[in-house]
Every structure is written in structure tokens, then in C-alpha cells.
Amino acid sequence: MDPSVLTTLKILLIGQSGVGKSCLLCRFTDDTFNEENSVTIGVDFKMKKITVDNNNIKLALWDTAGQERFRTLTPNYYRDGQGAILVYDVSNRDSFTCLETWINELNKYSTKSNVIKMIVGNKIDQERKVSREEGIAFAKRHQTLFIETSAKTKEGVHMAFEELVRKIINTTSLWDKIEDTNVVRCNDENIGIEPSSCYC
Ligand code: GDP
């Protein structure tokens, strides 16, 4: 990737209604959080420029705007996505269970065979129903990135988007390096050292 060129990447947010997709997006793009107990804010699209490892990137961030309540997204939603953030709510086991369906949909409709996936366990400020280890095991099984976040407290949010973008622009070296002490591979022995995200 030529660092002098502003590259646009399309990133998709996917997951059950209410897991916090819109809030993650608002936290990342505007540093805001909607406390309201509404089901979804219904954001559908946001742009943000970021610099990752000296690469200037324009992100086109797509949210479902509530379409997922009808159980499926249109194939068009997945078109040309280079990255996908699959979100569940760590305080809602059902949202974790149905991740399998969302990842299958993504695999079915994605027009890019090498779309980079990241599993995000959101709402870690809440009482957990899904352990970190279960999240990591799921990510390992599907060979995706993994991170836990709270859109409310901001924890992990910027890192999630940055790591996804880093992997998209740097895929070839993925298996060769661990750039951050907070980042581990899922197949490392040291999963217990409190990583913030992992490469699988
Ligand atoms: P979406 O349907 O997946 O887009 O979910 P929303 O972003 O609309 O969020 C659904 C609800 O969860 C809202 O009431 C948010 O305030 C709340 N929420 C989102 N993220 C978090 C979080 O990290 N922690 C807590 N405690 N609540 C959150």
C-alpha cells in the first residue's frame, strides 16, 4: 500500500440487534455514547479518516440500521467489504450463540474471499454471561481477530478498528509478527496474560 495515497476501505458491522453496533460506531467516529435504552440508534453509514502505520486510510463504516431485526441482511450489504466486525454482547449469551449464523451469512455473501473478520465482545462494563475464553475459542475456530470492548467506557474501541485496518493493509505479515504486547495469537500458550486482542 502506498502511504501517500488515501485508500478507502469498506468495513461492515454485523451482529444481533442491541449488541451495540451503532454505539461502537458513534464512539469510534464521534467519541459519543447514547445512554438511551432504545434498541438501536439506526446509524447506517459513517466515514472516518485514520492513519495506521503511516498509511492514510479513509474508512467507510457500514451499520445495519436495524435491518438485522428481520434476521438477515441483503446480499448488497456485504458487497465489496474488505473488513467485517462481528459483534456480540458479553452480557447476552444468545447474541454470542447466533454469531455462527452471522459468520455463515458473511461467508456466503461476501464478494471478497479474503474479507478480514474481527469478533468483538462488547459491553464488558456489564455482568458477563460469556467468558473471554469462549470468545477467543470461537475466534480461533473461525480464524478471525478477537477483542473485547465497551462502547460505554471506550475500552478497546479504537484498538478494535485499528487492529482490523492494520490486518487489512498488512495481511501478508500477519503470521510473522506480534507488534504489541497486548496482542497475542490465539494459539499461544499464554492466553491467560490478559491480552486485549488476538491474531488467529
Ligand atoms: P445495535 O442494535 O447493535 O446497533 O445496538 P445499539 O448500538 O443501538 O445499542 C443497543 C443498546 O445497548 C443501547 O441502549 C446502548 O446504550 C447499549 N450499549 C451499547 N454499547 C454498550 C456498552 O458497551 N455498554 C453498555 N452498558 N451498554 C451499551
Image: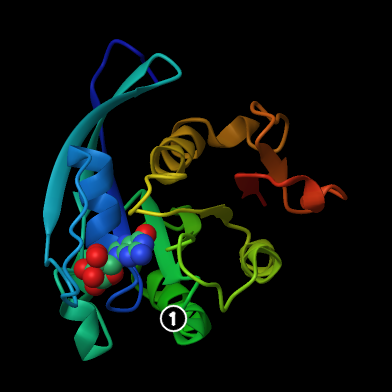
Does any portion of residue 78 appear in the rendered image?
Answer: no
- How far across and how far down the image is residue 32, in percent? 19, 45
- Which quadrant of the figure has residue 180? top right
Reply above or below: 200 against 171: below
Reply above or below: 15 against 194: below
Q: Nearer the viewer, residue 64 or 28?
A: 28
- How far across and how far down the image is residue 122, in percent? 43, 62
- How far across and how far down the image is residue 116, in percent? 47, 51
Question: Split into 4 quadrants, where in the image is the N terminus?
Answer: top left
Where disc 1 sits, the SS reads helix
Ligand 1 - quadrant of the structure image:
bottom left
Ligand 1 closer than 8 Å to the CB at disc 1?
Answer: no
Does any portion of residue 21 appear in the rendered image?
Answer: yes
Give the residue at x 52% y 55%.
148
Estimate how packed mark 1 is, as few (under 14), some (14 to 19) or many (20 or more) residues with alpha carbons within 10 Å: many
Q: Nearer the viewer, residue 31 or 6?
A: 31
- Which quadrant of the figure has residue 111? bottom left
Reply above or below: 128 against 195: below
Q: Nearer the viewer, residue 121 or 32?
A: 32
Question: Mark 1 = which residue?
Answer: 95
Give the residue at x 51% y 80%.
100
Instruction: Tell me if 53 is positioned left or right of 65 in this view.
Output: right
Q: Amino acid at mark 1?
A: Ser
How many numbered markers are drawn? 1
User: Of all residues shown, which one is farthest toward the top?
Assistant: 4
- How far across and how far down the image is residue 90, in percent? 50, 71
Instruction: Tell me if 89 is positioned left or right of 12 in this view.
Output: right
Give the residue at x 45% y 83%.
101
Instruction: Tell me if 107 is positioned left or right of 48 in this view.
Output: right
Colouring rule applied to residues: rainbow
Give the residue at x 65% y 26%.
179
